[in-house]
Image: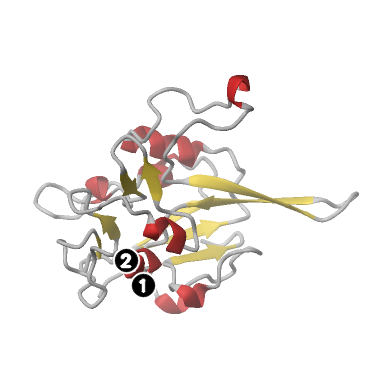
Amino acid sequence: MAQTGWLIDLDKCTGCDSCTIACKSENNTRPETSPMPFKSNGGVLPDHVSYRWVVKKEAGVYPQPTVTFVTSACNHCQHPACLASCPVSDVADPHNESNAIFKRIEDGIVLINQDVCIGCSNCIHACPYGAPQFNTASAKVEKCTFCIHRLYDNNGQRTDFLPSCVTTCVGNALHIVENFDSADSGMHAPDGFADVSLTVPSVRFANGKP
């Protein structure tokens, strides 16, 4: 089975959040108004859904502190924990599009069928990367789709377009890998990245060499 994956260059990610904003704009994710903190609710972010976000990791001590920015989203795993945990998906038939969560055989992209999802949130608790997001308006779970609507035309043919996050990345830190090798899963992952043996995520990291 073919697999589409991510390549993230940690040396080039500046934490600008352009990918986060591009993703929200492309997918029209909640909320419709600004998700800025409000003093009235203690500075807590209002209800929102984000398919991609940036993790900011600080380390070291003065005078040599360091900060690493890691753009994060669904890793479209070889063995998705979300699918395995879903009560309305058949793990023995992961490519069946009648599942609430299924893995496309054409490219390995993991999708959530909104018509079948019951909003139980099992997948949210199962995913080691925090990818599934609960939408309180629809009472369904959503996540990154790899911008599949951009990758393919109405006839299912591959286009020249890339996911909005990749196109928008100002530092050229985020790349799509058309034929991801599972042997590269989690390569050069930053500290704190979940054990890749859990799900074999389709993402590898680089340090200055895409």
Q: Residue at x 40, y 29 (%)?
A: 31
Query: For residue 17, which quarter of the picture?
Result: top right
Image spot of residue 93 (x, y percent) = 20, 74
Q: Residue at x 31, y 64 (%)?
A: 86
Q: Amino acid at mark 2?
A: Leu
Question: Which tag, 1 or 2, sits closer to the chain's start?
Answer: 1
Q: Amino acid at mark 1?
A: Gln
Circle number at residue 78: 1
**Disc 1 element:** loop
Image spot of residue 76 (x, y percent) = 37, 63
In-front residue for pair 32/188: 32
Q: Which residue is mark 2?
A: 83
Query: For residue 188, which quarter of the picture?
Result: bottom right
**Disc 2 element:** helix
Q: Residue at x 31, y 42 (%)?
A: 139
Image spot of residue 113 (x, y percent) = 22, 53
Q: Residues within 10 Å of mark 1 (few under 14, many from 20)?
A: some
- Rendered position, 23 above or below 96: above
- Rendered position, 91 above or below 118: below
Q: Is residue 107 found left or right of 155 in the rendered image?
A: right
Q: Residue at x 56, y 67 (%)?
A: 194
